Amino acid sequence: RRGLVEGFDPNASEVAASPKVDGLPLASVGTTLYSATPDDLIAYDTQTWNVRWEVKLAGVSHVAANEEGEVAAVNPNGCRLYSADGKELWKVDTPFQPSGVALSESAVLVGTAKPRLWALDRKSGEKKWDQTWDGGANGWARPRVIGDLVAFPVGSNLEAFDIASGEKKWTFEGVGSAVGVDPEARQFFVISGERNALSCVDASNGQAVWTTKSDIVLVGPPSFDSDGVYLFGVVDAKEVK
């Protein structure tokens, strides 16, 4: 299985390069792209497209990386953290299949399909705290981090917790699982559970800064730049921007 990576000039919308990489590209930070095959996790140098490192790890579904080159990867068995040169720093098994992973300065945040949210110490992998939702339907949401806050979609709510203590800070109701993040503005962008509205949520208090309705079915997660927020919708089974 091979993936095709396309680089676009943001001003001209032209394809700058289309290198082929092994596996499915999952994340890119700085000049490193992380890709997963059924059996391996691979880090590519995006300047040369040479392999920086490769490790045996089957079934990787999500990764999260930082500017220091550390990368957390989850597969059906749990979570592993790797250094910038591909050395395994620690591994933690989870009782339920992970649904996503995120990094903060001090922690690795792992969501599971149960649903359940784990905060693991970034240095040691030791569990700092966990949050469970008894009787909740299985979900496949990713935790999202802004500073010292982690937000996790559960059912029709977006719930936010202090990363250091696990204290619940707020709940924003009526959302789906697709969540966009603007760390600099400290805002989350969420699509409503009915997929007909987009809200900008203030990370400090969980209140909507604004909400806009849509006549089309919205799909996410939202992305953004300095000019605005972008997302796709569906009309008559055709994708439109």
Image (tube, rainbow, N blue to C red):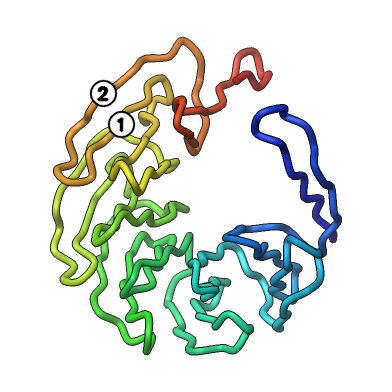
Residue depicted at x 33% and y 64%: 116
Instruction: Provide the residue designation for mark 1.
Output: 200
Residue depicted at x 32% and y 65%: 117
For residue 53, the mark is none
Residues at marks 2 and 1, CA–CA distance in whole angstroms: 5 Å
Q: Residue 101 appears at what percent x and percent y? A: 45, 64
Q: Which of 131 and 104 is in front in this view?
A: 104
Instruction: Provide the residue designation for mark 2.
Output: 210
Q: Residues within 10 Å of mark 1 (few under 14, many from 20)?
A: many
Q: Residue 89 appears at what percent x and percent y? A: 50, 89
The answer to whether the residue labelled 2 contacts the one labelled 1, judged by CB atoms less than 8 Å apart, is yes
Q: Residue 58 appears at what percent x and percent y? A: 68, 76
Is residue 157 in view?
yes
* Image position of 62 with respect to 146: above or below: below
Which three-letter amino acid code belongs to the residue tagged 2?
Trp
User: Seen from this angle, which residue lies furthest top?
Assistant: 215
Disc nearer the start of the sequence (2/1) = 1
Instruction: Identify the secondary structure beneath mark 2.
Output: strand
Residue 181 figure quarter: top left
Instruction: Identify the secondary structure beneath mark 1.
Output: strand
Q: Classify residue 125 as left or right of residue 29.
A: left
Residue depicted at x 60% and y 89%: 87
Q: Which of 220 and 227 is in front in this view?
A: 227
Q: Nearer the viewer, residue 225 or 26?
A: 225
